[in-house]
Image (tube, grey):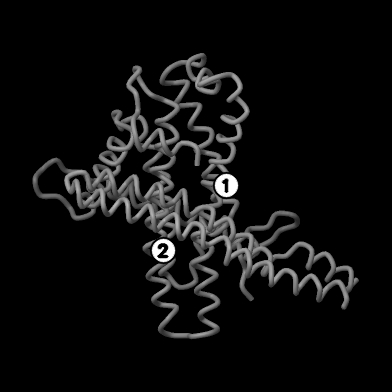
Amino acid sequence: MDSLSLIGMVSIVTAGLTLAIGSIGPAFGEARAVAQALAAIAQQPDESGTITRTLFVGLAMIESTAIYCFVLAMILVFANPFWNFFAERAGG
Amino acid sequence: MIEITPDRWVLWQIGPFALNATIVFTWAVMLILVVGAATITRRLSSQPELTRWQNLLEVLVTGIRDQIRAVSRQEPGRYLPFVGTLFLFIAVSNLLAVVPGWRPPTASLSTTTALALCVAVAVPVFGVANEGLAAYLRHYVKPTVFMLPFNLIGEFSRTLALAVRLYGNIMSGTVLVGLLLSLTPFFFPVVMQLLGLLTGLIQAYIFAVLAMVYIASAATAGGAHVKDSTEESTNG
């Protein structure tokens, strides 16, 4: 197998794994955060404004790990530097 | 062909200077904001009957002021121009994604990095302005001197997180719609566009709130201690 198809295969498999593993952790984390926030709002409906704002900011923080993984997967699939390097060498 | 950044879409080129879609759409957003605000504020009235556009601006400004006050527990006046501009710029560029052919400039890592760098510069500026240079620098050696490198890493990583978060969210919407258009055209991409509008507005809100949180955590004016939400989330 030449290096180009090897790179393509490894990139696609790694992108899938990155998204799969990288999204399950934040999913659990966000689920916990939302459940806690709902319980807190149920106990203290007057504070729902503060709780919701803090929840949104916290969710954005948790979510950013998943976003990192997504950006990495997108780079691997659509703008892979190794692929471009070897494709250029094969072409030129 | 799906592009993961509008930087590659070059509209016009003279020699080494390329005019790419990011720059064009950034200037379009700025033009819309500036011209819109200038025309609306030309005829302001303090009478009970307002024009509907003045009403819109008043709702926006008071809303942003209330949010800043709630997040930072300080008077919003001095933070309003910076944070409000961040929010309005990101919100307008994301919401205009409903216009066909529009590529949000926030879907490019260069735009979001520039915005995040603005926040990274604004934090020490507001901090020094509020409590002086020495008191601001003392934040870095709290609780002990050994925490200095970690504080510096935290400062750097939260700027990176700010940029990549906005970029990833907006870019994912664009790429997803592009992929769905080739798989299941007509109905499903429209639903994802609608979801993209929601995420776009939420991301604009989150970017502005996080900028405010970072600024407020470095600039606790008059010894007033900033509590809960602001202090817990400074090390994102």
Figure quadrant of residue A92 = bottom right
Side of B71 relative to B56 (left or right): right
Between B27 and B67, the residue placed more toward the observer is: B67
Q: Where residue B217 sits: x, y (%)?
A: 42, 30
Residue B30 to residue B73: above or below: below
Residue B100 vs residue B218, the one in the foreground: B218
Mark 2 to mark 1 CA distance (whole Å): 20 Å
Residue on which disc 2 sits: B96
Give percent across and percent down for residue A76: 69, 65
Q: Secondary structure at mark 2?
A: helix
Q: Position of residue B142 (x, y in %)?
A: 51, 21
Q: Is residue A23 above or below residue B62?
A: below
Amino acid under disc 1 = Thr
Query: Which residue is drawn at the image coordinates 38% and 24% (left, top)?
Result: B220
Task: State the residue at coordinates (35%, 38%).
Answer: B229
In the rendered image, the vertical position of residue A42 relative to residue B97, given as above or below = above
